[in-house]
Amino acid sequence: MTFSGPRPRPSDQTTEFWAATAEGQLLIQRCDRCQEAIFYPRVNCTHCGATELSNEAASGRGTVYTYTVARRPTHRAFADAGPYVIAIVELEEGPHLTTNIVGCDPEEVAIGMPVELSFTPAIDGIALAQFRPATAHP
């Protein structure tokens, strides 16, 4: 399945992130000064303000921090999508990520549910990071 709805527009700050998603990898930043993990790509550390940030591959594991079920389309591109889950996932590394939970009935999603990364390719080479219920979560 290829996603054809609205997609992000890569910027100078996010080009490397979006290129990694196309390769099936989720990048997060880590502050070289305080070692805190950061998501979404930024110029400064949100914890200490440092500008020395490095990219690293996230494990792809997390838990549902909170969620809602969209029963009406949130955009006209989703008119035929039916109910879908919009969630905040807490990554194993710490940052929170707004995403969708896929691969299960929306009624099965629960706060604290272990999830794992799943990518949906878009028509222009970008892939969207989404999550599905984890098959095994250490």
Image: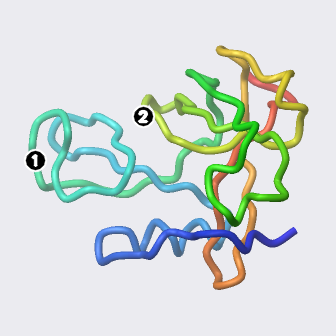
Closer to the camera in the image, 9 or 71: 71
**Residue of label 2:** 95
Q: Quadrant of residue 115?
A: top right
Across and down, in percent, residue 20 comes to 55, 68
Under mark 1, the amino acid is Ala
Q: Quadrant of residue 54?
A: bottom left
Query: Along the horizontal axis of the image, is 130 left or right of 81?
Result: left
Q: Quadrant of the N terminus?
A: bottom right
Closer to the camera in the image, 79 or 123: 79
In the rendered structure, which disc, 2 or 1, sits on the residue that comes first in sequence?
1
Across and down, in percent, residue 114 comes to 72, 23
Is the C-beta separation of discs 2 and 1 under 8 Å?
no
Rendered residue at 64%/43% (across/down): 60
Q: Quadrant of residue 10?
A: bottom left
**Residue of label 1:** 50
| Count of marks overlaid on the render | 2
2 vs 1, front mark: 2
Across and down, in percent, residue 116 comes to 73, 38
